[in-house]
Amino acid sequence: MATNAQIGSKTVVSYFNTGTSAYEEFAECDSIDGIGLKRPEVDVTHLESDAVERIGGLPDGETVTLMFNMVAENFLIVKGLVDAGDLVQMKIDFPAPLEDSIFFDIIPLEYKIQKVDPKGALKLSLGGRITGDISEDEPAHT
């Protein structure tokens, strides 16, 4: 049986540049990991409970890591985002057959130049934490 799995090739990762008021693509994004929300459980057991009672808490953003080939423009952008420490609006465009976009905000927390190897490409990572919701609707830009 054939699969309907979505391939990651041709996926585009962008950030909203407040200076140009437009989404700008990161160059040569290698991988994206950790896009998601999780809802913690909240214990609401009380003295009249017959068993432990729980409800879902507020959604909490996961930690996201974006990996790039080390190109000069990415380093300057990523370093600037982490140094500023401001909320960054992100957009991911998926290719066909999905052909959809998702939007989310991150707080950039760290960047790293990954293992330097004479036989391999230098890699740059951007780590951040999702804050707010993940949506298919483009947010208002402030």
Image (cartoon, rainbow, N blue to C red):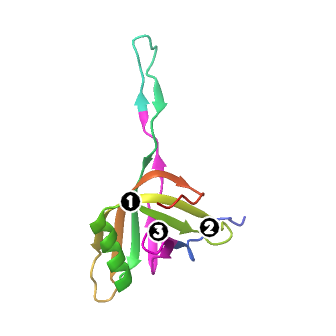
> Is residue 44 toward the left or the right of residue 103 in the image?
left
Q: State the quadrant of the N terminus.
A: bottom right
Q: In 3D space, how far apart are the residues under numbered discs 1 and 2 (Cα atoms)?
A: 29 Å
The magenta region covers 13-41
Residue shown at the point (56%, 71%) measured from the top left: 8
Q: Determine if residue 101 is in view.
A: yes
Residue annotated with mark 2: 6
Magenta run includes residue 30 = yes
Q: Earlier in the sequence, mark 1 or mark 3?
A: 3
Q: Quick one: label 2, few (<14), some, or many (20+) residues within 10 Å?
A: few
Name the N-terminal-most of marks 3 and 2: 2
Q: Is residue 54 above or below residue 79?
A: above
Q: Looking at the picture, how far across and down is residue 127, in whole percent?
A: 35, 64
Please say if the residues under marks 1 and 2 sit with CB atoms less than 8 Å apart.
Answer: no
Question: Can I make out residue 71 in this image?
Answer: no
Residue 142, percent from left and from top: 46, 60
Numbered badge on residue 16: 3
Of callouts 1 and 2, the N-terminal one: 2
Q: CA distance from mark 1 to mark 3?
A: 10 Å
Disc number lying in front (3 or 2): 3
Nearest the camera: 12 or 121? 12
Residue 87, label in figure: 1
Q: How packed is label 3: few (under 14 Cα within 10 Å), some, or many (20 or more)? A: some
Looking at the image, is 48 positioned above or below residue 11?
above
Residue located 43% across and 22% down the image:
52
Closer mark to the observer between disc 1 and disc 2: 1
Secondary structure under tag 2 reads loop
- The amino acid beneath tag 3 is Phe
Q: Position of residue 77 (x, y in %)?
A: 36, 76
Could you tell me how many numbered marks the image carries? 3
Disc 3 from disc 2: Cα separation: 25 Å
Residue kind at label 2, given as amino acid type: Gln
